[in-house]
Image (tube, grey):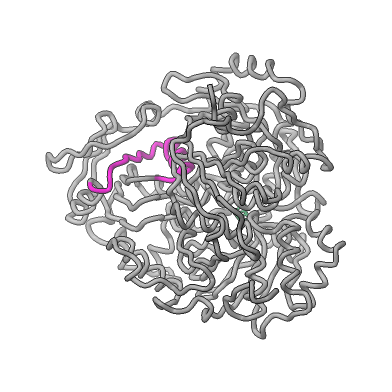
Amino acid sequence: MTRTLYDKLVDAHKVCDLSDGDMLIYVDFHIMNEYTSPQAFSGLETKGLKVRRPEAHLAVVDHVNATRSVEAPDAQSKLLIDNLESNCRKHNIAFYGLGDPRQGIEHIVVPEQGLASPGMLIACGDSHTTTYGAFGALGFGIGTSEVEHVLATQTLRYRRMKTMRVTIDGDVAPGVTAKDIIMKVVQVIGAGGANGFAVEFAGSAIRNLEMAGRMTVCNMAVELGARAALIAADKVTQNALSGHAHSGLFEYLSETWETDPGAAFDQDITIAGGDIEPLITWGTSPDQSVPITGTVPSTKSFVSPKAKAGLERALTYMGLSAGQPIQSITIDTAFIGSCTNSRIEDLRQAADVLRGRKIATGIKAIVVPGSAMTRMKAESEGLREIFEAAGFQWRPEAGCSMCLAMNDDVALDGERVASSTNRNFEGRQGRGARTHLMSPAMVAAAAVAGRLVDVRDFV
Amino acid sequence: MRKTIKGIAAPLPLANVDTDVIMPKRFLRTITREGLAAGTFADLRFYNDNSLRQDFVLNQEPWKAANILVVGDNFGCGSSREHAVWGLRQMGIEAIIGTSFAGIFFDNARKNGLALPIITSEKRDLLLKLSRNGKIFSVSVENKIVDIDGQEVHFMMDDATQTALLEGRDDTLDSLKKSEAIDAFENSMSLKEKVSVIK
Ligand code: SF4
């Protein structure tokens, strides 16, 4: 029987069926952070339970920590960090805390450590765990009760999702990045358009991406509602598996981690790669995007009354008017960071734009490398000098920072941010803050111009 | 968990209500599950100076007392924070009726006895209208029916979720009863298939 990659991954991890229609699936590897795990550990405590396989878990501090210094930004954040450390010590779980050279954003750290590889099932109390699909692994986010469940049983309750294949056919134009590809997919399918689905990305534009780009695509697939995002393992994947601290640790030899030819998907969607332009979001949902050459949509662009109401609310929040050219939107802040776009490849792309240029007067510009290792690599390549010469703040510590603004990097009410992150929700980067999502190179270009601008005019 | 949830339903027709809106991040710096009612929808309920926003439905009569919400598409999208569900439960919400929910939010709701009846968009529009009129809704998890003054609207809910809500079991303790199957699975794995993070 022909099977999709997703079905192979589920089949390989199924422990048993349960009487109510769910199944138990085995979790090869589980990652925790400081803010979604405390109540899971206290759950174990209350119930008198042990961690079943301590060596199959890793805990990383990334959400609340400051990036200006290695000190926690405030007492509450320190409590979360210390709590995670003591829970890990007690249960003998690996912990990458502040000041550890391996610390950073969980989804940057794990691939960097060689802990993701084809055929794995990876869970984490964070929605962007879909990132590991770039390796042909099944990664998905879970809630805190499920964190408790996986600590105690090394399994999760699961039900099989429907499958969707998104094919990006044909090459993308120069200047169009992986971020633009996934933002296009989110625009076409819609936020929540893939609720209940595991999405596999295919087509030449995907095949041509290096691992960093594939991770960006799978990372942001959760904005579609996808509970898993997958890309078949190939030569590019194989090449990325060696040379890391934990390389070769996991190997699943009895299966090929790709969809069998002829296997059927519940839904098949094709997008022409050549049609994709650099995109920016204008609204408060990641699917509210237009090409950088476009204009802010007006109610004429939408037919349904509901979409019109949504548009008006978003425009009011964002302080924009319908029909306004995108490139007339001035910004206050530029932020490069997050698990979507803070890898070395992203920093290189942004630095290419900034080399020999200066950011516009009055702009605050911040770059937070995704991990301590990424920062050191960037510094050894001379990227720090380029960013600093251009006027960017180069942050010495890694973390989520202004992606969700749980630390002290918070945008103010009304502050407009060009951001390489993944969510432009109301209040995401600070109460009343206005987020425009785009690729890291576009953020760099916007910082230089002081407004949203087409990066293709910068090369 | 009660088999029937009865009470005022509040209309919240916005699409894509995300977990940052349901539980803003400033309430997440906690190591317990308690005290989250104050954070639920905080930016919609309060102005910066903590005064009440009269434009938000849950601050208005009769919906102040609502224990049911009728919501727009893709409710609960965004982050995995279970705090969103804990907060909703702590502010007294027992059921949220909508067309689609984000996956992690859906699973979190099920673990915490929050019922998420799924209906078509036509039925949702009807329920929105009835909720605007301040009608009393009666949601039967057992029969998968919402009853409003004798008008019955059927909803969808998968069997495992229905069972979980009706039984209110503890999944962790329940799954531990399957230890033999988990042992057998682990024993069938080769050494190379067992991740061990070296410290
Ligand atoms: S970088 Fe942003 S999206 Fe990624 S894990 Fe951190 S907060 Fe979540």
Q: Is residue B176 above or below residue B14?
A: above
Q: Residue at (13%, 42%) from the top-left corner? A: B149
The answer, for residue B136, to whether it is visible in the render is yes
Residue B52 figure quarter:
bottom left
Q: Residue at (60%, 67%) from the top-left corner? A: A419
Q: Which residues are magenta?
A: B101-122
B16, A209: nearer the viewer:
A209
User: What is the count of numbered marks?
Assistant: 0
Q: Residue at (68%, 16%) from the top-left corner? A: B188
Residue B169 figure quarter:
top left
Residue B117 covered by magenta stretch: yes
Residue A376 covered by magenta stretch: no
Q: Residue furthest left?
A: B150
Q: Would you say B96 lies left or right of A396 here?
A: left
Q: Residue furthest right?
A: A380
Q: Could you tell me residue A21's position as x and y percent? A: 43, 23
The answer, for residue A41, to whether it is visible in the render is no
Q: Could you tell me residue B74's position as x and y percent? A: 40, 50
A209, B176: nearer the viewer:
A209
A74, B20: nearer the viewer:
B20
Q: Is residue A15 above or below residue B148?
A: above
Q: Is residue A156 above or below residue B22?
A: above
Q: Residue furthest bottom?
A: A361
Q: Quadrant of the C terminus of chain A?
A: bottom right
Which quadrant contains ligand 1? Answer: bottom right
Q: Residue at (19%, 54%) from the top-left corner? A: B129
Q: Could you tell me residue B38's position as x and y percent? A: 44, 56
Q: Could you tell me residue A53's position as x and y percent? A: 70, 27
